[in-house]
Amino acid sequence: MNWCILIPLIVGIICAILGYLLRKFLGHENSDECNQKIAKIEAELEACRRSKTNLESDLKSTKATLDSSSLLAVTKTTATAKTVSLTPEKILTTATTAKPSTVLSIFNVDDAKAALGKKIKENDLTVVEGIGPKIQGLFHAHDIKTWKALSECSVEKCQTVLDSGGERYKIHRPGTWPKQAEMAHKGKWKDLSEWQDKLDGGK
């Protein structure tokens, strides 16, 4: 047997086999790595697509909000313009056709004087039995400056106004004050006078 020929041949075959196996192994490694990179790129692409969809949705929502705001501003401007454009004739017509509840009461100083025996000023809260100048000042400080405003106050609200003045005002009882103010506002001076004759300091 000629070993000089056989040994190099065997070595060559072994090297060829090792080379084939090595190339196959490395090729498999590269294939897995490429697949991982492709999967990562696809995931990033999908994230970009979702982000784009969300941005488009936000843009539509913002546009709709701006359109609504613009429409509201135009409506308010139009309403203001219509109000300003009222002619004297229209104003007169509106005033004459207003509901009775919206028409202000007319204060008659002579009727008030005849019933109460003294001259009073319109919306003088001291006309109410139990209210003096200092308590009237408390109500004025709470923006209650007319008989009508006082008549619309609850007894609890009147008590809150009194409490704001301190301990010395807690002895007062405002239970009848809103009703008295309503009579004054409606010009029921005789009824108010007769009722006040029966009251004791507004109680």
Image (cartoon, grey):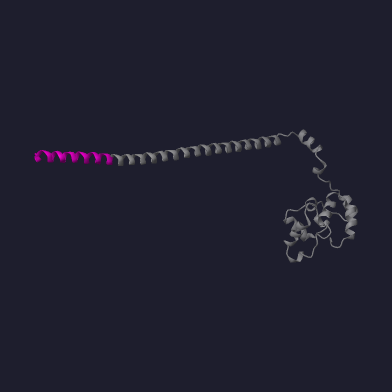
Please say if 109 is above or below 59: below
Residue 58: percent from left, percent from top: 53, 39
Magenta region, main secondary structure: helix
Specify the segment rendered in magenta: 1-26
Quadrant housing residue 89: top right
Residue at 41 percent across and 38 percent down: it is: 42
Please say if 91 is above or below 160: above
Residue 154: percent from left, percent from top: 78, 55
Q: Nearer the viewer, residue 173 or 82?
A: 173
Q: Residue furthest front?
A: 1
Residue at 58 percent across and 36 percent down: it is: 64
**Is residue 169 found left or right of 73 in the rendered image?**
right
Please say if 50 is above or below 114: above
Q: The N terminus appears in which quarter of the rendering? A: top left
Quadrant housing residue 165: bottom right
Q: The C terminus appears in which quarter of the rendering? A: bottom right
Residue 150: percent from left, percent from top: 78, 53
Does residue 126 show up magenta in the picture?
A: no
